[in-house]
Amino acid sequence: MRAFATPPPVALRAEAPRLVLNRNDFMVWAVLGRLFAGKWWRSYWFYAPIVVLGVCLAVAQTAPAKRLEFSLLDYLIRLRHSSGQHADPHLFFVGIDDNTQAKFGRWPFARVFHGELLGFLSDIHPAAVTWDILFSEEDGINDDAFIQGIRMLGAPMTLAASTTAAQSENSIRGMNFGLTQPFTRVEGGRTLPDHESALIPTEALRKVCFFGFADSMPALDGVRRKVPLVLKIGDHFYPSLPLQSLMQFWKLQPQQLRIVLGDAIYIESPQVRRRIPINREGEFWINYRYEENGFLNGSYANLHDEFGRKYRNEPVGNVPDLKGKLVVVTLTSTGSSEIGPSPLNERSLVPLVFMNVLDNILRQDYLRIANAWLIWIGWLLAAYGTVRIFEHLDFPRAAAMLSAIVVATVAAMYLLFTKANLWLPLGVPVLGFVALQLSNGGHRLLREQQAKRKIRNAFSSYLAPAVLEQVMKNPDEIKRGGVRKPVTILFSDIRGFTTWSESAEEKVFIAQLNEYFTEMVACVNRHGGTLHKFIGDAIMAVWGDAISTGLENDARLALRAALDMRVALAQLNQKWQAENLSTHKIGIGLEHGEVLVGNVGAPQRMEFTVLGDAVNVASRIEGLTKYWHVDIAVGEKARALAGDRFLSRTLGHFRLVGKQAATAVCGLIRELQPGEAIPETVRIYEDAFSAYVAGDFKRASVGFEQYLEMEPGNHCATHYSEICREQLIKPSAEPWDAVHVSRAK
């Protein structure tokens, strides 16, 4: 056995890793905890933009959304289009039209005529000629004449090829492409689809001509808005018909072009430099500007005749100058040409798609497309910025602001498109923004309805129906807590309530009390008051707290409610007496003053109420009714606001509990009829009281005695008459102020 100089190793239990938090970690977690402990992240303004953004991103990928964006692009193109604009003068469009077929026969007519035209053009020296026509089938001896004309032309010629028109039997594996060579500098080529089949010119034509692929797939609405400039054919990359045409026009070799898919085609040669934008599929977005009349153009038959005469040195008329131009020949005749919708025309020649591509590249007039992610990031920022603003606007202002934003956005789209060729696909973003703000408005409306329901539930039991309707129209009048308002306050109290409650049978007592409250609350509601609370047998009501109809009218409504309560009690007493139930008296006190109006209480129970000195004063005035033998007493402020419509009699000047200044209080008699004068009895009483206040006790005594003859037993007149006699017999040593000190709370 091998000996160990040290103890053998012992298997140790792996220790679980420990989480060590430093002070900064605790601070970070504390901040995150505070943020997510709150309710802001659950609020509408936080999650609504994100939800709408997610919906918009999903909708933007649908076919209807794409059609919408393309329709807006087409509309911008039509707005920008002007019939006076013309394409690049290096382009010349030759149409094989109805006149041509009438002269040379139905298409396809003999290619010998193409050879003749090219021979005639040899004296004109065009820079290059392109045939946007497939010559994929041989034409015997006519091909020889065609090829002879190509050789006579002395300029490079490009023919059309196609992968979209090819069938599976049109395999091009191993075929010799003749003059046409593939690109050698392509980056990101794996994103392109691989084409194994294609229709290409005949072998004889490939030896003397270049060719390019005239592929263009229409969008869902049939409009061709982009074309591939680079295609993958087998294992190699070849140019489209427009790109090959320009390569021959500029005398470029394939190796002079560097192609970066998803970026651009870079042309860097001594004679020309270009950056042609393409997407990852090698496609070029067409900045569509022109229909047929926007290009220099001519009829195949007319050019054949005119240039033929010129070639034979015969007299000719005005012939177009094609020297140095890129001449494009295509079918335009009825029944032979390909027709499809374009942004400018519902029935447009499809070859005009390539003409516009050629014009865009020659003039470097490229359509730029805004980055979608930048648009959506900007949308999200705008959504968060406006959703909070819209929450504080009323609906008319919010609608006006939303309309202004939409109009400004559309104007920006138009200006950027027309001035900078920048297309902002904002159809879905704008609709999403409008939907967000409409949902915001709906959310606000729902919250307001919920708030109104809460207000209705909370206030329906003690607000007059008419007042409640006003509150529902202006809920902020209730929502705003702690607002100072001038109000008129009413307190009422049942005389002898304690004795009644102790002596009456419980069921009878409760039923009679509920009947009393029902009638009294009806009086308050009938005159637009707010029933604030029942305090035992007492009732507290306020005018001007929830909704004010004006200080004077609030006071008048309160006094009318008090008079109605008097009548209602008389009717109740009459009914109770007939039922052998106890009858009762009440005292009512009213005063006007500024109070604090709002919701007060604990989170578990809130109460809409009024707080302030005026509340206490009104309660003290109600307490005076018991001692001065009146049922309705009104403070001087409420009486002054109510005006001369009400007949009252001064009870006296009182220094109420807790007050230093005296308060004039009157007893309310009734409301005067329009045009009715103050009765003589009341005038006599008021004159006597004025003399009493002035210290003219002799005149006051005479007046009170005279009043008592008309109103025997009146408590106030009797009381003041006795004071006058005492002062006449033994005048007071202290200065006279005619103020009673009230001890009643």
Image (cartoon, helix red, strand yellow):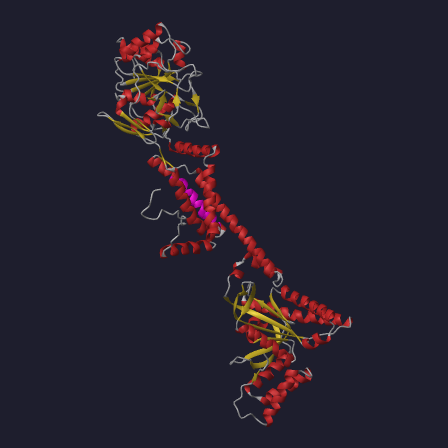
Quarter holding residue 248: top left
Residue 164 on the magenta segment: no
Is residue 404 visible in the rendered image? The answer is yes
Residue 398 on the magenta segment: yes
Residue closer to the observer: 446 or 711: 446
Tell me the magenta residue range. 396-412
> With respect to residue 519, does 617 lie above or below?
below
Residue at the far top: name it: 141
> With respect to residue 502, does 294 lie above or below?
above
Residue closer to the observer: 373 or 665: 373
In the rendered image, residue 307, in percent from the top left (x then y), is placed at: 30, 12
Question: What residue is drawn where x is 71% and y is 72%?
Answer: 570
The secondary structure making up most of the magenta span is helix
> With respect to residue 677, does 522 lie above or below?
above
Quarter holding residue 21: bottom left
Residue closer to the observer: 507 or 548: 507
In the rendered image, residue 714, in percent from the top left (x then y), is placed at: 67, 82
Task: Classify residue 512 as left or right of residue 249.
Answer: right
Is residue 289 visible in the rendered image? The answer is no
Q: What quarter of the picture does the C terminus occupy?
A: bottom right
Residue closer to the observer: 110 or 220: 220
